Amino acid sequence: MRIDKRLTGRGLAAAFLSCGVLAGLVACGSSQAQVSLPKKSRAQLVKDAPAPPSTRQIVITAYEGYWRATNQAVDSRDPKTARSLLAAFVPGSAVGGLVSGMQELWRQNENAFGAPVFHIVSVKLTGPKTAAVHDCIDLSQTGFQNRKTGEIVGGIGQSHDYLITTLANEHGRWLVTGAIPVVQACKY
């Protein structure tokens, strides 16, 4: 078998060229590239920011927060903690009366159980700094129980209570100022 010297020379040259390219690729992969990324423009960051919540959403959050805070305050069994929890959801003038009522529950060794199920029908702004939440609230699984026995000693409502709760905006916070049960059929 005879080998053409021209092919051997070309093959050898191709092999060296391939080794050179391969060595270059290996060298490129082993060092860190110095690449600068484009900067994001400020306008792009602002555009991606979420929209602020609506007044309706803020009022609903305050209304639902009031119910959670009330349960937490009752379960705290501590007047100072209860005052602190309630202060974020009711006017300062109402806190003392609510805590006094809770102290009676504590004397009877009761705590809260359950949580309301909200079925908010509407939120109406009744003035520049007042609102009313119309809720067909389900309070059937909410009430008080004896801490020692677990026995349910009182519920606070039915499964379809139509409740209008008023709120006022004081110093930038929506606070629950009252609740009126309404004799009206709930539809949801």
Image (tube, rainbow, N blue to C red):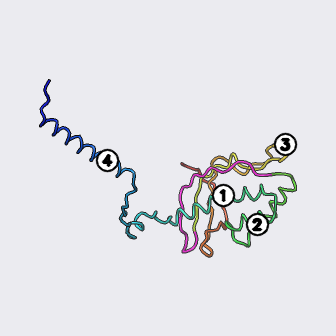
Q: Which mark is residue 23?
A: 4
Q: Which residue in the structure is indicated by mark 2?
A: 83
Determine if the magenta segment contains residue 23: no
Q: Residue at x 64, y 49 (%)?
A: 138
Q: CA distance from mark 2 to mark 1?
A: 25 Å
Q: CA distance from mark 2 to mark 4?
A: 74 Å
Q: Please state which amino acid type lies under the numbered disc 4.
A: Ala
Q: CA distance from mark 4 to mark 3?
A: 80 Å
First along the sequence among labels 3 and 2 = 2
Q: Of tags 1 and 3, which is closer to the observer?
A: 3
Residue 115 position, x and y percent, is 68, 50
Q: CA distance from mark 4 to mark 1?
A: 83 Å
Q: Which mark is residue 76?
A: none
Q: Of tags 4 and 1, which is closer to the observer?
A: 4
Give whichever of 4, 112 is nearer the camera: 4
First along the sequence among labels 4 and 1 = 4
Which SS class for mark 3? loop
Question: Does 108 sit left or right of 7 as displayed?
Answer: right
Marks counted in the figure total: 4
Q: Please state which amino acid type lies under the numbered disc 3.
A: Thr
Q: Residue at x 37, y 58 (%)?
A: 33
Give whichever of 129, 48 is nearer the camera: 48
Within the image, what quadrant is residue 102 found in?
Answer: bottom right
Q: Which residue in the structure is indicated by mark 1?
A: 181
Q: Which mark is residue 149?
A: 3
Task: From the image, give the main secondary structure of the stretch colored magenta.
Answer: strand
